[in-house]
Amino acid sequence: MKILSWCIRIALFLLVLVFSVRNTELVTVNWAPGLATQAPLVLALLGAFLLGAVFAWLMLLPSWWKAKRNATVANKALAKAEKSVSSNPSPTLVQAGAPDENLLALPIGPTHGV
C-alpha cells in the first residue's frame, strides 16, 4: 500500500511539474481598478489556490475550536464520573430469573435501530 501511495505522489508531482513548465507565459493579474501586476501563469494559479486554501482553513477554524471545547468538557465530565464511581463503589444485585422489562420493548430483527 505504501508503494502505491508513493507512486501516486510521484505521478502528481510530475504532473504539477510538467504543468508549471508548460505554463510560464506572463499574465496580467488585476487586483483593483488601476492596480495590476504581471506574473507567470503558474504563480498566479498557485497564489489563487493558496488563497482559497487559507480561506477554507479560516472558515473551518470555529468548528474545530467548538469540537475541541466539547471534547474537553466531555473528558472532564468523564473524569468526574469515574472519580465518583471509584470513590463510592456500590455493587448492584441482579436477579437471575427476572428479565428486564425494557429489553422486551426493543425491536428484534434486521431493521432494529434503523
Image (spheres, rainbow, N blue to C red):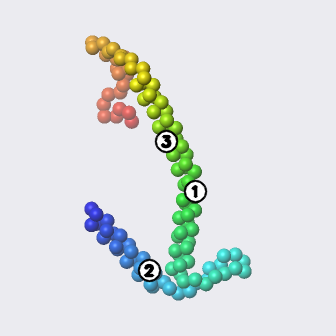
Q: Does residue 18 appear to the left or right of 73 in the view shown?
A: left
Tag 1 residue: 59
Rounded to the nearest angstrom, the CA distance separating label 1 from label 2 is: 29 Å
Residue 69: x %, y % from top left: 54, 43
Residue placed at 48% from the left, 30% from the top? 80
- Between label 1 and label 2, give the one nearer the viewer: 1
Residue 14: x %, y % from top left: 37, 77
Q: Looking at the image, do the residues carrying marks 1 and 2 touch, with CB atoms under 8 Å apart?
A: no
Disc 3, SS:
helix
Residue 87: x %, y % from top left: 42, 23
Tag 2 residue: 19
54 lies above or below 43:
above
- Between label 3 and label 2, give the one nearer the viewer: 3
Q: Earlier in the sequence, mark 3 or mark 2?
A: 2
Quadrant where the N terminus sits is bottom left
Q: Looking at the image, do the residues carrying marks 3 and 2 touch, with CB atoms under 8 Å apart?
A: no
Tag 3 residue: 71
